[in-house]
Amino acid sequence: MSDPIGICVLGHGVVGGGVRRILREQGGMILERTGLTFDLRHVVVRDLSKHAQHADLPLTTDAEKAIADPAVKVVVELMGGTGRAGELVEKALRAGKAVVTANKSLLAARGRELFALARRNKTCIAFEASCGGGIPIIQSMMQGLVANRIDDLVGIVNGTCNFILTKMTKNGWGYDQALAEAQRAGFAEADPTMDVSGRDAAQKLSLLSGLAFDVSVRESDIHVEGIDTLQEIDIRFARELGYVIKLLAIASRSGQNQQGNLSLRVHPTLVHKNDVLAEVSGSFNAISVYGSALGHALFYGRGAGQMPTASAVVADLVSVGMGIAQRLFDQVRIFAEGVPAARMLDFEQLQSRYYLRLTARDEPGVIARVTRILGEHGISLSAILQHETNDTNLVPVVITTHLAREGAVRSALEEIDRLGVVQPPTMRLRIIDPPKEFGTGN
Amino acid sequence: MSDPIGICVLGHGVVGGGVRRILREQGGMILERTGLTFDLRHVVVRDLSKHAQHADLPLTTDAEKAIADPAVKVVVELMGGTGRAGELVEKALRAGKAVVTANKSLLAARGRELFALARRNKTCIAFEASCGGGIPIIQSMMQGLVANRIDDLVGIVNGTCNFILTKMTKNGWGYDQALAEAQRAGFAEADPTMDVSGRDAAQKLSLLSGLAFDVSVRESDIHVEGIDTLQEIDIRFARELGYVIKLLAIASRSGQNQQGNLSLRVHPTLVHKNDVLAEVSGSFNAISVYGSALGHALFYGRGAGQMPTASAVVADLVSVGMGIAQRLFDQVRIFAEGVPAARMLDFEQLQSRYYLRLTARDEPGVIARVTRILGEHGISLSAILQHETNDTNLVPVVITTHLAREGAVRSALEEIDRLGVVQPPTMRLRIIDPPKEFGTGN
């Protein structure tokens, strides 16, 4: 048994409470497993008077002094945001302290600079909790899958959106009702923009795809569409066609070599109901990875919440304590100097299958005109669906396509929406084919 | 970039070929990711004349000399079996070489002794490839989940059995036909006993449950039933009831504390069709873990085969090269001195739900007599299923139960089979309830 490892926690929120609970309840088990003990020396808050009920905690407002405490070896940043959190992480790194963080926004915005700072100060940043909550996806990418060239990564990485979509799908609710329930249940914030816009998922994808493809990815490399424009009718039509709508974060390498262009995107996607991702409900996350040797692997678990996130934070503390985090950080290529920027596929060149929902006026020949335009753009149809309706003015018509180019679909829809026989805008969603290997029987 | 790490591979089989292919095709990528290169110095075979077509390989029959080569830092044992493989692993450890192995039989049989030998010689054994093929389950248990007390672990860990059961389920085949197809496709050996008897799964469970519960588990602690007595009719009835039959490896801790008794078992199990494990097809593996902080997590991927297993072997080589394997091994508590033996739950005390298929003679009052006996043993019924049939002599009757004690069910069936109104033996399978958290919508 070695000396206790001094910790300073920045922020006194939900996850911090989870970390303390694990260290209190499972400290003995962690000691037996790893020989390590931890000493929570400081909890840095902004305003002591707001935390009067936590007299048992080593609360302080003096972050600088807490970080500088020579007994503090690891600074756990759980404040969130990029401003003050960034300043304090910088201070910690300059003081040679290891940093454990769940803050994907900070890494997405300033990762390159902070990683370089950590290297200059011979310390490390551990960030398992930044993606997939308690799922050990970062360590799996860096260690277990290290022998694999990764070709595709497809994930449900935002629990808020998945909770909302699950409620819309299973309860037949509208978006607003599902969002309200997510807020009531603590799965969405009062301002849900970061989650429902897809941005949180994009920040996670920038980290995961950097690890997968050994490149430096900027958040702006990622095409992002949120779930806030989804309608119940699309969820119903999708189900009728055998699909479930999920917000997916997708990273693909085109071609078979290390230098292929990448396509990185976050958008609502039709997932075949037999795809295991279709079964991922509520606030759970799941990440499918396709490796050159491993084939398809999937990592599933709670992607957010107090204890799952705390599980990843404590795993990082142990990794720091055992010296593993430092060894991995010395090698990690995301945000590293000399690592190439991601070479992005022109989004217009993306090949996908599409779901189109037109609102057609009840005139003869509408379908003929629409499908002719699609044909002229080289887009071939997979299915078409129109129900009998009492409303004889506007009729929803759903078309799914075979593989088509994003640019061709965009041009065709512009033309279709100008026809005057459909009410714009036509809804356009992408369809992802089932994982190449799942459920093949082999 | 450091000096190449010298490797000696024991055995020249399928997985060894996969390891060489990864080092050849992805060596540049691995160097970029980790700074490590590997030098394959010796491939030890029994009979050079059988490998004449591999003149490019550093083949040798002199294992002792190859292991003793001072340039060899890691010995990769891919021979299988416990005899010669055990001898050579011993030699490697005595010479202070790290050992990477996929050999769960060897570890199940002699793990305690070999781990102690590694410790005495200040080296390590890495064994990611021994469970779950390419799925990084060992490292996830040791690192990512280190902060979690594990309460339950449920896995599909034998690809051969899962392939056979998938064929029986999806194609309506009998056991013999499915086994023959598995052999033809290379998923089952000529003598499939090790797999279909459940023993391979039990050996893996002994490793996984040791890691999960911080105890020393012997293979004989595990209750094992194979798939070789399963009949098509049970697969059909299970489907009618909403279940799929899978060979599961199950480890559970009773009660809420670290000292609870364990139940460890491998047997064909009825899994609810909505359980994600029901969707795991063919040679894929999946392991569900329930942790105190993480909740439910699932790891899915190819559990066998050349490249997935080689993926895990090379991951272990990298882990040895980075010094991570040694640090983890120094801490790992399975097979360690001073680690308590697993305290097993008396199997008769197991609580489970059951599927019973009786072959009833067509006489009045059979069901009444059978259900009365079940009632007398405190076993309450959940469902009962009897179809109209042309065969008026023998009629299959399926009964599912609520939670009951294993011992009560055994006694009741002995009594029922003595009644004279059913044709013994009555088929008895266990039912597992859906994972506590999966698909809850939260």
Image (cartoon, coloured by chain):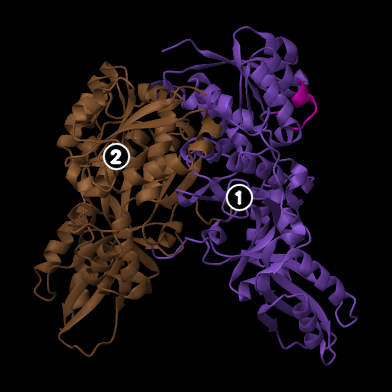
Chain colours: A brown, B purple
State left or right for residue A352 relative to residue B124: left
Looking at the image, how many numbered discs can be counted on the residues? 2
- Name the outermost residue toward the bottom: B364
Q: Chain of mark 1?
A: B
Q: Position of residue B36 (x, y in %)?
A: 46, 18
Name the front one of labels 1 and 2: 1
Task: Tell me the crowding category of disc 2: few under 14, some 14 to 19, or many 20 or more residues within 10 angstroms, Cα based.
Answer: many
Could one spot residue A247 in this view of the protein? no
A63 versus A130 height, above or below: above
Q: Residues within 10 Å of mark 1 (few under 14, many from 20)?
A: many
Residue B82 highlighted magenta (yes or no): yes
Label 1 amino acid? Ser
* Residue B50 on the magenta segment: no
Name the residue type under label 2.
Answer: Leu
Q: Residue at the spot x=51%, y=61% of the render?
A: B436
The residue to which callout 2 is attached is A262
Q: Decide if residue A318 is on the left or right side of residue A41.
A: right
In the image, residue A111 above or below residue B259: above
Q: Which mark is residue A293?
A: none
Could you tell me which secondary element the residue under label 1 belongs to? loop
Is residue A392 visible to us here? Answer: yes
Residue located beneath label 1 in the image: B283
Tell me the residue at 35%/66% (across/down).
A166
| Magenta span of residues | B79-87
> Looking at the picture, does residue A180 appear above or below residue A432?
below
